[in-house]
Amino acid sequence: MQVKTMNAENNIKKQRIIVGSIVEILIDHEYYVYAQILKNGSYAFFDYRSERQLQDFSVLQEKPVLFIVAIYDYVVKENIWRIVGRLPIRENLKTLPLAYIYDANKDTYSLYDNNTGEITPCTKDEARGLERASVWGDNHIEDRIRDFYNNVPCIWLEEHYKLFSNSN
């Protein structure tokens, strides 16, 4: 069960999005995973899960990153994911990775620079291995994390898989 922070009027207190904050995500009431708020609405999701809530967040400093994507603000502001701590941003996370944009109408690819907002044309091979430029909701990310740990393809990445399958 997600714990909500209450204010004096017994209303749910909104959380502030602060770069460096650590958010806690409970998956299926079974295990916790963690992400760090980066700049420009992006979050780094760590390859770490535990049946117990993490007390020492420094353990995340050494964990690999599963993926970095943009998340809708409501997810944190409305306490869907709870802010539980804060860590300095790792050097390798201070510059956000490029993402790709696919235009199905024109069958073209572009690179999106999450740091500057710049969009430049690219080839399919240049886009391969990048995240698709999009903003994710909590349920989609939770599905993606669950699928990763269950070693099954994520339905929300189905088009991505098709675009970059070896038969293309």
Image: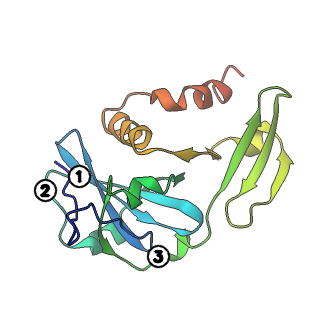
Badge 2 crowding class, 10 Å Cα cut-off, few under 14, some 14 to 19, many 20 or more, is few
Say which residue label 2 marks: 52
Q: Position of residue 10 (x, y in %)?
A: 20, 63
- Label 1 and label 2: CA atoms lie apart by 7 Å
Residue at 77% of width from left, 27% of height from top?
A: 104
Question: Residue 89 bears which disc, if any?
Answer: 3
Residue at 17% of width from left, 60% of height from top?
A: 53
Judged from this view, the residue extending furthest toward the left is 52
- Label 2 and label 3: CA atoms lie apart by 24 Å
To which quarter of the image does residue 27 belong?
Answer: top left
Residue at 47% of width from left, 76% of height from top?
A: 89
Say which residue label 1 marks: 32
**Secondary structure category for the residue under label 2:** loop
> Which of pointers 3 and 1 lies earlier in the amino acid sequence?
1
> Which of pointers 2 and 3 lies earlier in the amino acid sequence?
2
State which quarter of the image contains the C terminus: top right
**Dots 1, 2 in contact, CB < 8 A:** yes
Give amino acid for label 1: Tyr
Coloration of the structure image? rainbow
Give amino acid for label 2: Arg
**Number of callouts in the render?**
3
**Dots 2, 3 in contact, CB < 8 A:** no
Residue 95 horizontal side relative to residue 31, left or right: right
Q: Is residue 62 visible?
A: no
Placement of 19 over or under 105, stated as above or below = below
